[in-house]
Amino acid sequence: MTASASPRPAPLSVPELRERAVHRRAIEAAIWGMPIVSVEAMRRAFFNAGASDGDIVYLSRPADWRLQITTPNGSSLYVFLNFNLKDGPIVIDFPAAVGAGLFGSILDAWQVPIADVGPEGEDQGKGARYLLLPPDFQGVVPTGYLVLRPATCNGYAAFRAIPRTRLAEDTAKAIALVKQLRVYPLSQVDAPPPQRHIDIAGQLFDGIVRMDDTFFDSLAVMINEEPVQPRDAVAMGMLRSIGIEKGRPFTPDAGTRSILKDAAAVAKAQMMSATTNVTPYWTRGRWGSPGFAIRGAQTGFTYQSGAVFNVDDRGAMFFFACALPKKLGAATLYLIGARDASNALFDGGKSYRLHVPARVPAKQFWAVTVYDLDTAAFIRDAPSIEINSYQDIQKNPDGSVDVYFAPKSPAGKQSNWIYTEPGKHWVAAFRFYGPEPAIHDKSWTMGDIESTK
């Protein structure tokens, strides 16, 4: 007996085919465009703080939740600047790291680190004048500079000023070092304009990407400002199918916006999933690094290796973080914790504890910080975002420290408590500033974050 053939599905209409194509390609465009849209969001926050290209914004005290960028810490005094090379070369005059720590990276608009600066960077802590040349620069390159050639017109730099202690006099030295930073056009090198340093401590600095249809508005803005990289020819064709084309306005109708909004949500879910799946650092336990971070470090965060351009990893990396160094692990080393012993995501409504053994191998300091998984930023309105070794925290008799994560502080543990929000998942980062051999050779180990129930 011959089985009857299954009925063929009805062919899709032309409008249905178009909707599916737009949705599919918008998901890929969101993952591909994540790094440059993140830069646009941070640039917008920079301008909203009252800054312009050529200004420097900084924090005169450690960050609270109002510093809304991806996975910062609550220990350093952050420093940011944006640059745009459309009118010619730019000079960043970086001071010698005397009296405090000062280090970070300079990145292009795709968040490719062009140079690390500071003691572990190009200037080796001695200070230098960095000269950034536009992508199409054809002129004579002057001497006396460390020359950088970004592939984009836009870019930014993120630095961390680290006082030797939290005493007021050491903080003042760190801020004085920040105020030696200068940014100006090469054309004004003989008479640089007065430098504006804008303190944003206590102000909202919202540089988080909105994963909805407005993501594509930001992407269109940046596509129109930047040269097309040869590696991105296929992506540019993909963008045309969703209405983004260099040199043309982006004007999607309401129906297309609905599709784009859903596509951005799907892309976000994919990148969040990648964030919570880490490769363990130690033989036992769940502290480790997401695969996209490991593979990114192997390529200097270009995500290009041989014939492979790993767009998925790059998108996840810059959903989760920003301002990555060219050389990971020299000035800092960090580990991510996203799941408990049962492999469940951390629940903001529950209580957890982390036991930090004594003698943490960090020359400068250590810190454990909590982030909202949904944004990879500090939890908004959180009264406590981080515990670090600079703080006056309770220590056990053997020098170890217990850190508590919960919506409310356990009785008598306020100094060792980090807030988590009910109804939200969260991730933690444990950072070693000035990592010492015991963390690299793994002779020092740490247990997982455990539920206290």
Image (cartoon, grey):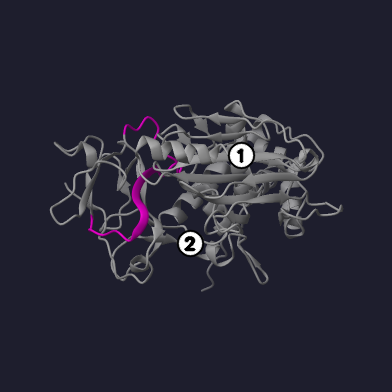
Q: Quadrant of residue 258?
A: top right
Residue where numbered disc 2 is placed: 330
Q: Position of residue 66 (x, y in %)?
A: 44, 31
Q: Quadrant of residue 113?
A: bottom right
The answer to whether 281 is drawn above or below residue 417 in the figure is: below
Q: Secondary structure at mark 1?
A: strand
Can residue 367 be found in the magenta stretch? yes
Left or right of residue 92, residue 415 in this image: left
Residue lying at the far bottom in this picture: please name it: 1
Residue 398 showing in the rendered view: yes
Q: Position of residue 356 (x, y in %)?
A: 24, 55
The answer to whether 119 is drawn above or below residue 34 in the figure is: below
What's the residue type where badge 2 is placed?
A: Ala
Q: Quadrant of residue 165?
A: top left
Q: Which residues are magenta?
A: 356-383
Left or right of residue 39, residue 295 in this image: left
Which of the numbered marks, if any, corresponds to residue 1? none
Pick whichever of labels 1 and 2 is earlier in the sequence.
Answer: 1
What's the residue type where badge 1 is placed?
A: Leu
Q: Position of residue 338 (x, y in %)?
A: 35, 53
Q: Residue at x 54, y 55 (%)?
A: 125
Q: Nearer the viewer, residue 232 or 403?
A: 403
Can residue 301 be found in the magenta stretch? no
Q: Nearer the viewer, residue 369 or 271?
A: 369
The answer to whether 239 is drawn above or below residue 205 in the figure is: below
Which of the numbered marks, if any, corresponds to residue 81? 1
Residue 260 showing in the rendered view: no
Q: Residue at x 53, y 63 (%)?
A: 297
Q: How busy is the neighbourhood of tag 1: few (under 14 within 10 Å), some, or many (20 plus)?
A: many
Q: CA distance from mark 1 to mark 2?
A: 23 Å
Left or right of residue 400, residue 221 in this image: right
